[in-house]
Amino acid sequence: MTWTPPDDGRDFLGYGEQPPVVAWPGAARVAVSIVLNIEEGAELAVSSGDERNEAVHELVDPPIEDRALGMESHFEYGSRAGYWRIMRVLDGFHVPVTLNVCARALVRTPWVGTRAMARGDEIMCHGWRWETHLGMGPDDERAVIARSVAAIRDVTGERPVGWHVKSNPSANTRRLLLEEGGFLYDSNLYNDDLPVTLHTGPRPYVLLPYAFDTNDMNFHVGNRFVHADDFARYCCDAYDWLFEEGAAVPRMMTIGLHTRIIGRPGRIAGLERFLAHVTRKGGAWFARRDAIARAWLDAGL
């Protein structure tokens, strides 16, 4: 008996054996994207008028209906202490960053946007709240996109050109982003080490892969990382492998950070060690995600 795969639009081949060759600036082998997620103040909280409290932070709590002061305090650590510690490390290496910002969080921590603009960093939109868009109706999602863009513009003076919602977009997300206009790329895919260009809209639109493995979330999820060196070793190993592959086909690498996670004093050395390793080895183009998307399009890919 034979089985016919469903016509679901999934692509299991991608670029296959011969990925496209892109010339990153400076003949870099790897375009390295540092993404700092800004979610503090956008976590689900009864005290913010949300329907429930966020359950995942330094601990995993069962749902409670009352105000979760412990959860709130864990998130506040990110903006009060972790953010500044991370930025000092990034400043030390003169590394540009893309801030993946929940718009509600930015409204509550506007200094993050002000500093990003002064530093020359990019603001990518992480939705309004820190939540998946899976199951969200199209009218509601359209309103969330518009509200988020407006809030980021109000704080920074610029609209975001990139989008990355928590975990899963809805079936309508990408279509709504294209309809809204002004977006250059989104990062809600995890299936490659190179960008992909869509030519289905009024202008080319780039899909920039994100990564959950080279990501400090692994200090929380399953405790895959425990010590700072766990994060550093994993990310350094990933960079070294991409560096070797990049001699023939330049690659892209994403490092995902969170202020309340890597910003802890027992973890921050992992970021410093990774940046020092890549700087010594060479071959990297540290770039904002919008710059990577534009370089990809400029190459005609």
Image (tube, rainbow, N blue to C red):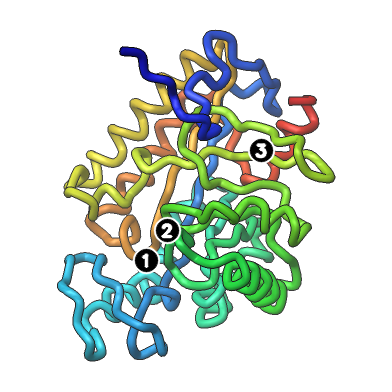
Q: Residue at x 56, y 80 (%)?
A: 107
Query: Can you tell which of label 3 and label 2 is closer to the viewer?
Result: 3
Q: Residues within 10 Å of mark 2 (few under 14, many from 20)?
A: many
The amino acid type, in three-letter code, at marker 1 is Gly
Tell me the residue that label 1 is attached to. Answer: 82
Nearer-the-camera pick, 198 or 86:
198
Q: Residue at x 49, y 32 (%)?
A: 279
Residue 294: quadrant of the picture: top right
Tell me the residue that label 2 is attached to. Answer: 86
| Residue 184: x %, y % from top left | 72, 48
C-alpha span from label 2 to label 1 = 6 Å
| Residue 63: x %, y % from top left | 20, 76
Residue 41: quadrant of the picture: bottom left
| Residue 297: x %, y % from top left | 76, 33
Q: Are marks 2 and 1 in contact (CB under 8 Å)?
A: yes
Tell me the residue that label 3 is attached to. Answer: 292
